[in-house]
Image (cartoon, rainbow, N blue to C red):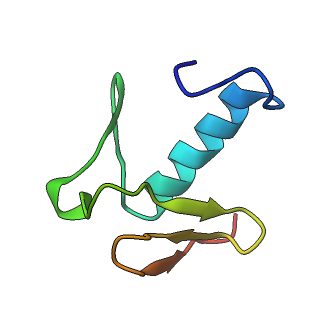
Amino acid sequence: MLVADGTEKDAERQLRRYCKALEAAGYLVPMRSGWLLPADRNTGPEAPAYNSQARTVTDPNTGDVWPLPQN
């Protein structure tokens, strides 16, 4: 729980949802022991933002917005 400060509600679940959203947008590739960031998706120092209501991932480094498939 490296990124949690204790104020989050169910931080582990939220982190898993974020990683799954990045996977759906092509920013992470699932591996046996976690995820891999492909070199072509390493766009800069700012992390992509996941908007769960709009079901999009936005890359603040490029301005790209990736809609996620509806499940």
| Residue 41, x across and y down, in percent | 26, 61
Nearer to us in this view, 69 or 49: 49
| Residue 61, x across and y down, in percent | 35, 70
Name which residue lies at 60% across and 36% down.
16
Q: Is residue 30 above or below residue 52?
A: above
Name which residue lies at 15% across and 55% down.
39
Name which residue lies at 27% across and 60% down.
44
Nearer to us in this view, 20 or 4: 4
| Residue 49, x across and y down, in percent | 55, 61
In the visual, does 27 lie left or right of 36?
Answer: right
In the visual, does 38 lie left or right of 32?
Answer: left
| Residue 4, x across and y down, in percent | 64, 25
Nearer to us in this view, 67 or 8: 8
Nearer to us in this view, 62 or 36: 62
In the visual, does 16 lie left or right of 61?
Answer: right
Q: Is residue 52 above or below residue 1?
A: below
Q: Is residue 54 above or below residue 35?
A: below
In the visual, does 62 lie left or right of 39?
Answer: right
